[in-house]
Image (cartoon, grey):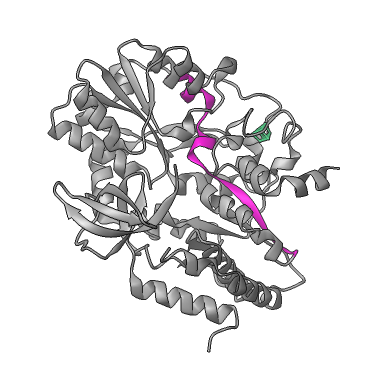
Amino acid sequence: MCLAIPVRVIELLPDQMAKVSLDGVTKTISLALVDDVSVGDYVILHVGFALSKVDAQEAERTLAMIREFAGTSP
Amino acid sequence: MKYVDEYRDGELARGMARTLATIAHSDRDYRFMEFCGGHTHAISRYGLEDLLPPNVRMIHGPGCPVCVLPIGRIDAAIALARNPKVTLCTYADLMRVPASGGMSLIKAKAAGADIRMVYSTLDAIRIAEAEPAREVAFFAIGFETTTPPTALAIRLAAQKKLSNFSVFCNHVLTPAAMRAILAGEGEGVEIDGFVGPSHVSAVIGVHPYRFVAEQFGKPIVISGFEPLDVMQSIVMLVRQLNEGRCEVENQYGRAVAPDGNLKAQAEVADIFELRESFEWRGLGEVPSSALHLRDAYAAYDAERRFGVETPSAKDNPACECGAILRGAKRPHDCKLFGTVCTPETPMGSCMVSSEGACAAQWTYRRFETQRIAS
Ligand code: SF4
């Protein structure tokens, strides 16, 4: 129940709903708790609701830091 | 899967483990509580404890809403579901939690109570719309992550003028539980820092944890749930301690803004207010640690609508869930673990939810546990 996962928005629907793709599986979720979501964005999905948008730049920054900690950064 | 697979790379995890082994000072211990059951699950599933130096230890925390819900609240939900007018909607995780007298929601359903599993609060709204003759009550549990979806359902019910929808509210608050754990430190629990739950912070932001650093002098890192996220957070905690720093840091910047989700916060604040006190399994009564509906939404409050009473009920005396949820014991300290109590025949809530410490231990590490026990 507590699980929350990143999913990709593939279609915006009326009533602040959206279709998302989760490894090829399609689901209809609510976007009522987040603003300015476009097709192609990733959102964190929890019990049928998007809780926040995934920030692509921050995601890259975290990975770069992980590589650095792992001693594998170029 | 994007934003998932890249944070599960085994090579990077081993690299980080090597870094950790070089930076962790061998003359001290590092005891970190992962507050959230989602982290407990990830740590067990990916065997992260095996990657940590022996003096870096993880302590499981109370962040599993199914686990911390006291038996009396489940008894109350079952009583509510037995009302012939009521359809009780619940998240699936609650179905098998042991209640008093060997009962559970699943057994009550088998005995004829109208109990339905839903994935989302919106499903409960749909049922209420489709079946106007039924009194649809939603069994709401969860931390700050799960509260906004409940708030939106209530808002929607009000907009649609649904008179047959209500919520049995059991939403609880993460910072209050952390404060209770820190206040009880010394009673078998010693903590040098926290791995904080990031999906909670996606809603409330990082500031509500400042007291952990400022009043209790412990570092806390808000952490994502993939294995590399957790490893990185542990490295960040070790660095803080080594450098004599004590701050709230955010490892999960990709989905947690420092202020959280203001829209979700506003929804929750409009509909809910603090309860004076709420009982937690393991922590007892914790002041200002839970929410209930404001008077303006009393019509949607199942507790008021049906006069729900919460009986005081005792856990199975042999079950160590309480001490495990406080971080004072581990699953293999329980006599029932893996013998009488398994996921098929759970004796306590920690064995039911996949985020529970006992279930995680059983699913991923039971053979090792048996070695320790023998
Ligand atoms: S093993 Fe079962 S009985 Fe023992 S503490 Fe865990 S849930 Fe409770």
Residue B108 percent coordinates (x, y): 47, 16
Q: Toward which corner of the image does residue B10 lie, by quadrant?
A: bottom right
Spot the residue most to the right: B374
Quadrant including the C terminus of chain B: top right
> Residue B300, how many percent across, how many down?
24, 26
Would residue B194 be found to the left or right of residue B249 on screen?
A: right
Looking at the image, which residue sits at the far front?
A24
Tell me residue B98's x, y (percent). Answer: 56, 25
Residue at 28%, 22% (x, y): give it. Answer: B136
- Can the viewer see residue B214? yes
Would residue B62 be counted in the magenta stretch?
yes
Q: Residue furthest top?
A: B84
- Taking the spot 68% from the left edge, 24% from the top edge, the residue there is B317
**Relative depth, front residue between B140 and B293:** B140
Q: In which quadrant is the N terminus of chain B drawn?
A: bottom left
Name the side, left or right, on which B332 lies relative to B208: right
Q: Is residue B315 above or below residue B61?
A: above
Q: Determine which quarter of the picture holds residue B241.
A: bottom right
- Whether B177 is drawn above or below B262: the answer is above
Report the front residue among B154 and B284: B154
Vertical arrangement, residue B212 with respect to residue B280, above or below: below
**What is the tally of numbered marks visible in this picture?**
0
Q: Residue at x 74, y 64 (%)?
A: B55
Residue B170 in view of the camera: no
Is B319 part of what is drawn in magenta? no
For the record, the magenta segment spans B54-76
Q: Quadrant of residue B84?
A: top left
Quadrant holding ligand 1? top right
Q: Is residue B322 above or below residue B42?
A: above
**Percent coordinates x, y for residue B290 in the rendering:** 40, 37
Check the image and name the residue furthest to the bottom: A74
